[in-house]
Amino acid sequence: MITDDHLPALQGMFPSWITTVSNDGEPNTTVISQIWHVSETEVALSFQFFNKTKKNISQNPFAFATITNPASFDMYTLELEYSRTENEGDLFDEMDMKLEAIASMSGMSGIFELKGADIYTVLSISKNNL
């Protein structure tokens, strides 16, 4: 599903966004710094400030995310299904370290507390035609 063509878009050069929907049908879209590549069928999102997103996912595990390739400016939409949250391990540590580096560069060190690595199964990925 995720191929080498998609990997540059998962490096965090451009912000991504995720859209979720509550049980009541209310959408919520939020910008995120990066979507991490886990495997060819999974990605991870950092769980930091996503109170509304996290609430929506607990009610409805499906979401859409958009990523952008920084070399070609190609945009892709990922159809996702929440799988699990990891609070330790290599992926969590890598995400925590990168987020702290981003925070440090923006003068916000110590503010971006990573609560978990939310793992999503990629159900589909499609190139956006603009």
Image (cartoon, helix red, strand yellow):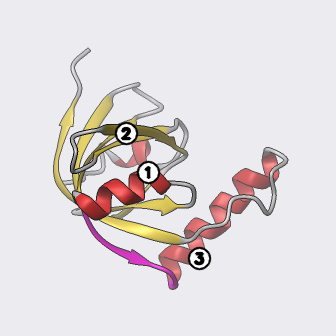
* Segment tinted magenta in the rendering: 82-89
Query: How many dots with numbers?
Result: 3
Decide if residue 39 is in sight here: no
Identify residue for label 1: 52
Instruction: From the top left corner, tell me how far across and down residue 67 is, in percent.
Output: 38, 38
The foreground one among 1 and 123 is 123
Instruction: From the top left corner, tell me how far across and down residue 60 is, in percent.
Output: 22, 57
Identify residue for label 3: 93
Can you name the residue that lies furthest to the bottom here?
Answer: 89
Identify residue for label 2: 28
Whichever of callouts 1 and 2 sits on the residue coming sooner in the sequence is 2
Q: Main secondary structure of the magenta part?
A: strand
Whichever of callouts 1 and 3 sits on the residue coming sooner in the sequence is 1
- Residue type at mark 2: give it: Asn
In reply to whether residue 122 is colored magenta, the answer given is no
Instruction: Judge the density around disc 1: few (<14), some (14-19), many (≥20) Cα neighbours within 10 Å.
Output: some
Instruction: From the top left corner, tell me how far across and down residue 85 is, in percent.
Output: 39, 75
Position above or below: 21 against 70 = below
User: Residue at the spot x=74%, y=53% of the render?
Assistant: 103
